[in-house]
Structure formats: C-alpha cells, structure tokens
Image (cartoon, rainbow, N blue to C red):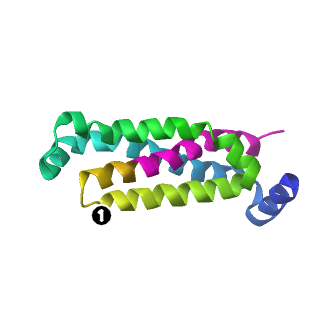
C-alpha cells in the first residue's frame, strides 16, 4: 500500500512530493520545539498572573517535557494501531487542542494540564516525524 500511496503522490505532485512531505514534518517539529521552550520566557509573567511561586511554575516546562518523553514510547504502538497518517493527524489535533486549552486556561492547574496534554501528543509526533521522512526517501 505504501508504494500505491507514493505512486499517487508522485502522479499528483511530481517528484517534489517528498520535499513537500518533509516540509510539512519540519513545520510540525519546529512548532513542537518552540512550544516546549517558549513557556520559559513567560514563566515570570505567569507566576505573577496566577500568584504561584517558581517551584510550581517550573511544572509548566517539566510537565510538558515529561509527558512528551513518556509519549515517545507510544509511537510504534500508535503507528501499528492506526497507521502513520492517522498518527500524525491525531497527534497534531490533540497537540493543537492542548495548546488552545492553555491559551484559555483560567487557573494554574488547568494551564499545567493543558500543557501536559499538548506535550503528550507532541512526543508521539516528534518521534514519528523523522522515521516518516526517512521512509519517503528510501531507494
């Protein structure tokens, strides 16, 4: 089936389809990297807005990175269960949902939960992106 999909993509986009797939995966990985580090800049403002100390505020980064790391272990299972394409779609949808939940968080606990949700799917996506790119360029 993979060759059928590759043949369809090659017919539709020409030989550049591999680069379009790589660009899509790169954009997803860049957004994931930015999301995992950008909160560090906002921690002082978040501490003031929610009235929490640095010991609690560090959970914004730690929770995201911890759930991201644990979720990387689920990558092979998710791909086997629902396929590469659906793993990508589900991971990005839940990642975006968690990020939107974080935007509208009304409490610090909700913010940590939302960041953890985003991190959990970001971990699956980040470990699925590189192998997917390499399989697009196989000989």
- Rendering coords of residue 44 (x, y %): 16, 41
Which residue is found at the position 22% from the left and 33% from the top? 55
Q: Quadrant of residue 41?
A: top left
- Rendering coords of residue 35 (x, y %): 39, 46
Q: Main secondary structure of the magenta part?
A: helix
- Rendering coords of residue 20 (x, y %): 64, 54
Which residue is found at the position 63% from the left and 41% from the top? 74
Residue 121 highlighted magenta (yes or no): yes
Choose between 47 and 19: the one closer to the eye. Answer: 47
Which residue is found at the position 56% from the left and 41% from the top? 71
Outermost residue on the front side: it is 109
Q: Is residue 16 something that shows in the picture?
A: no
Residue 54 highlighted magenta (yes or no): no
Give, as a single range, the part of the protein colored magenta. 116-139
Q: Quick check: 55 above or below 85? A: above
- Packing grade of label 1 (10 A; few <14, some 14-19, many >=20) is few
Position of 2 compared to 132: left or right?
right
Position of 63 compared to 128: left or right?
left
- Rendering coords of residue 19 (x, y %): 66, 50
Total labels drawn: 1
Q: Quadrant of residue 7?
A: bottom right
Instruction: State which quarter of the image contains the C terminus.
Output: top right
Instruction: State which quarter of the image contains the N terminus.
Output: bottom right
User: Which residue is the site of mark 1?
Assistant: 104
Choose between 33 and 116: the one closer to the eye. Answer: 116
């Amino acid at each position: 089936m993979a060759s059928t999909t590759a043949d369809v993509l090659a017919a539709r986009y020409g030989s550049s389809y591999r680069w379009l797939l790589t660009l899509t995966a790169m954009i997803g990985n860049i957004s994931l990297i930015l999301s995992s580090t950008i909160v560090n800049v906002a921690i002082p403002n978040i501490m003031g807005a929610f009235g929490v100390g640095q010991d609690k505020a560090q959970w914004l980064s730690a929770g995201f990175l911890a759930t991201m790391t644990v979720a990387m272990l689920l990558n092979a299972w998710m791909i086997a269960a629902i396929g590469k394409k659906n793993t990508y779609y589900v991971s990005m949808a839940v990642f975006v949902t968690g990020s939107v939940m974080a935007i509208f968080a009304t409490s610090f606990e909700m913010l940590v939960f939302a960041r953890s949700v985003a991190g959990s799917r970001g971990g699956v996506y980040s470990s699925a992106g590189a192998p997917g790119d390499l399989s697009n360029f196989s000989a």
